[in-house]
Image (cartoon, helix red, strand yellow):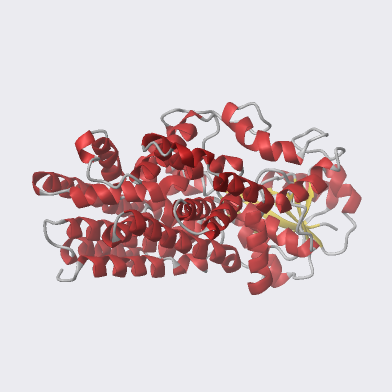
Amino acid sequence: MKIKDTKLYKLLIVLLTLASIPALFSSILEPDGTLYASMSKNIILYNDWFNLYGRGADWLDKPHLMFWITAASFKIFGISSFAYKFPSFLVGLLGAWYLYKLACDIYEEKTALISSLIFLSALHIITSTFDVRAEIYITTFTLASIYHYYKAQHNSFWHIVAGSFFAACAILIKGIFVLIPVFAGFIIYWLFTKQYKQLINPKWYVAILLILVFITPELYALYTQFDMHPEKVVFNRTGVSGLKFFFWDSQFGRFFNNGPIKGKGDISFFFHTTLWAFLPWSVLLYAAVVNLFKKKNRENLAPESIIIWASTTVTFLIFSLSKFQLPHYVLIIFPQFAIITALFLQKLEGKALQIFLTVQNVVLVIVFVLLSVIWFLFGFENSYLVLFFILAGDFVTFFFFKGNDIKTLIGRSAATSLSLALFLFIFFYPALLKYESGMHAGNWLKRNYPKAKPAVLNYIDAFSFDFYAPGEVKYFYNYADLDKTKATIDLVIYVPEAELPRLKKEYHAEVLKSFEYFHISKLTAKFFNAKTRSQVLERFYLVKLH
């Protein structure tokens, strides 16, 4: 392909950005996305920006900023899937821009372009465009903070303000642990380069003070919702302090597994998670990390590279040692992964280049083989169109990008990611969403019964119904709750099949519509196979009481 490498990388970045657009106009995946969307919807319905409600009750887990951003988007665009996803999409692009800026300042433009391209084409970044959660926000805000603090070492005081603002934003998305990837790299860099005076420089203590100032809206919200109301039942107990949860239980409590939200840690979890989450670049990333252990491979790199390595290493180790682990946590250090990989790629030459070009070709072939297996088993409606798309992506990847150079390796990898993104957004995710019954029930109710008073009975994970149903959704956790409001005019209840016999017998329930359901965020072999899918499907119903 006769095109200058930097122009090629810019073109691929633009194409990856455009490929994300279909994801913005699709529905929201359960459970996390629809939970966050429904909570943001409640902010608009109640006109209450300081108290968070989920499942019809006070909600204490993540801080407020993501919900504030989403609710503001709802105010502008209306309550919709697009309005939920659009801010995250913009913030993700902002993250790619900050990654470019940081890599440009420490290295040069080509490294910056390759880093941004790797970041945008990593599998978990692609899927996060569709399945929007908090981590894209955290990733961008921590990276923006690192960039401004990097500039603040020798530049304007306003970089301190900007760095602290973005650090505070990251905290207001997830919690105070995000300060580790922000500050760990700088502290280790100053120690290694003997810049000890930086540790006592007043501007860094001003930065911490500014962070505290910027997070005061969150502290006020938590205090007024929880600390002022110890009678509220949260985590099945009273006397819960929102401030204590924010500063301790939500972070250190999860790390030490002694808080109200517990998990089961596995020290190898993020090693094998990164293998699929950072595709198609993961093998190259692991090789790049091993390469850094040799001193000669670090000698010609900018000293500021220590900031990147240290931030990555400390954060990765803390994640690995934590007892509470989820795959999307690792997204926070994907920008650092991208820079490390980009630097390694540009040093490949001769026999090493040929080896890794071959290895990467094998990885890419495996990706297309897996897509073909999914096509064969899943049973798409437009089956031959899907197959044609997969084969076309394969053809473009291996015949449009030819040669034995770095540009070919990067071009093929990014083209594979582009094909993968379009496959997911246009074919795979829409096919999965056919089994998100709550979304279909909510939309059906909105179209056919817009004056309905929607409710959920004996089911706590009806987040998609909560978001897509018209107005406020009530939660009945038992039949005693239902009895108190069963005479409500236009009451329509979303129920699992197990509740239907009792509702018909004792409440003379009329079935308005039934919907097929599968927990699509936990895919199984039987569900994947169209021939056995019916064996694992459940049913949910919209019923009206008489």
- Quarter the C terminus occupies: bottom right
Left or right side of 132 for 124: left
Q: At 61% across and 43% down in the image, what residue appears? A: 175
The residue lying toward the viewer, choosing from 511 and 54, is: 54
Q: Is residue 529 visible?
A: no
- Residue 469 against residue 368 in the figure, above or below: below
Q: At 61% across and 36% down in the image, what residue appears? A: 251
- Residue 153 against residue 46 in the figure, above or below: above
Give x and y (percent) for residue 83: 60, 67
Q: At 46% across and 58% down in the image, what residue appears? A: 95
Give x and y (percent) for residue 203: 56, 48
Q: At 89% across and 48% down in the image, what residue appears? A: 483
Give x and y (percent) for residue 474: 79, 54
The residue lying toward the viewer, choosing from 176 and 202, is: 202
Q: Is residue 438 visible?
A: yes
Left or right side of 516 for 454: right
Give x and y (percent) for residue 327: 47, 41
- Residue 407 against residue 204 in the figure, above or below: below
Left or right side of 107 for 209: right
The residue lying toward the viewer, choosing from 38 and 534, is: 38
Left or right side of 381 for 246: right
The answer to which quarter of the image holds residue 68 is bottom right
- Quarter the N terminus occupies: bottom left
